[in-house]
Amino acid sequence: MAEPLAFVARVDAAEEAEALAALTAAMPEERLVPFRQLSPAERAAARVAVVANPNPAEVAALPGLAWVQSLWAGVERLVGTFDRPIPIVRLVDPELARTMAEAVLAWTSYLQRDMPAYARQQRAGVWRPRSYRRPSSVAVGLLGLGALGTAAAERLAGAGFPVTAWTRAPRDVSGIRTVHGPDGLTALLGASDILVCLVPLTAETRGLLDAGRLALMRPGAALINFARGPVVVTADLIAALDAGHLSHAVLDVFDAEPLPAESPLWAHPGVTVLPHISGPTDMVSAAATVAANIRAYRETGQPPSGVDPARGY
């Protein structure tokens, strides 16, 4: 019996069909089988699983797994959920980094060009040109400098925005000014006109932007959260917007998704709500990345570099 490649996911039928088609095309030498179609013998034989928001019980039913490959960049739902230590490899896809950097630049420009103010003027029937701000006069602070953050920082700098990035530990990236640690975060918050959040969700980053840290932000600053909803304390953000301390927030991620109909964020004049579209997974590109990882494993017997459980990413 040829060893199957298990596919373990909780996605809708259309998403599953798209993923299976792309993965099969990218690695025709593999026998990719959805979990529900695996026989007991095949479940015992599987050494690798490709996962997308998997049911932990289904992963537990694959006792021979050497590692799992996530189809998503975010892995906070996976870390600590399995019944035994299993190396988790997150998706590091150049196309995902490109699309996220594109979104960061687009919405940073949206704020730099005062688009929220023009939207309010349109609703009020007001024709009033506003003063133009050059990108060079708008300081952008970036929280997080992984693959997505690095691509975003480079894209912003290329468009003329002065960028400073914050990381938990010291890190050097050519052409990007960096700060780190608690003192670096405090300095960055006070120096940024637009703050872009791209940190992974971990125990350390949950609630990172609370009332105290939002109060440290420059008066009139704006926030873009493309990381995970719980990184920002929603009630504290609304209070900062209501008080006029912050001018606007572009939010693509939330504590609960889809965003509940009763959420005050929907109608808040200082909030732009997006339906988690800033960094969509391109299945063709993602499948090529996954296939390369699995081929390397088949050749060497060594799983790719995985998530550090202590850090959570």
Image (cartoon, grey):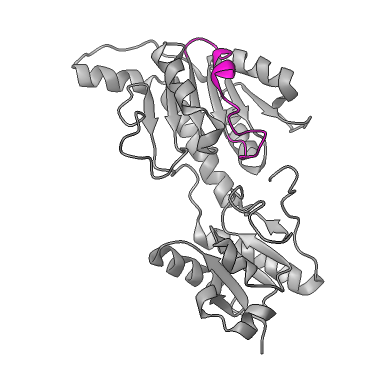
Q: Residue at x 30, y 19 (%)?
A: 118
**Residue in front for this viewpoint, 234 or 95:** 234
**Residue in front for this viewpoint, 103 or 263:** 263
Name the residue furthest left.
Answer: 125
Res. 124 image quadrant = top left
- 10 vs 231: above or below: below
Name the residue furthest bottom.
Answer: 1
The picture places residue 202, in percent across and down from the top left corner, at 64, 39
The picture places residue 238, in percent across and down from the top left corner, at 42, 21
Q: Looking at the image, how many numbered discs can be counted on the residues?
A: 0
Q: Is residue 154 left or right of residue 19?
A: right
Q: Residue at x 72, y 25 (%)?
A: 178
What's the magenta region? Answer: 198-220
* Magenta part, dominant SS: loop
**Residue in front for this viewpoint, 104 or 263:** 263
Q: Is residue 296 left or right of residue 115?
A: right
Q: Is residue 8 magenta?
A: no
The picture places residue 110, in percent across and down from the top left corner, at 41, 27
- 39 vs 241: above or below: below
Q: Tell me the quarter of the image containing the N terminus.
A: bottom right
Q: Is residue 297 left or right of residue 160?
A: right
Residue 159 visible (yes or no) = no
The picture places residue 283, in percent across and down from the top left corner, at 51, 60
- 228 vs 138: above or below: below
Residue 273 visible (yes or no) = yes
Q: Residue at x 51, y 45 (%)?
A: 99
Q: Residue at x 71, y 64 (%)?
A: 67
Q: Is residue 200 magenta?
A: yes
**Residue in front for this viewpoint, 177 or 260:** 260
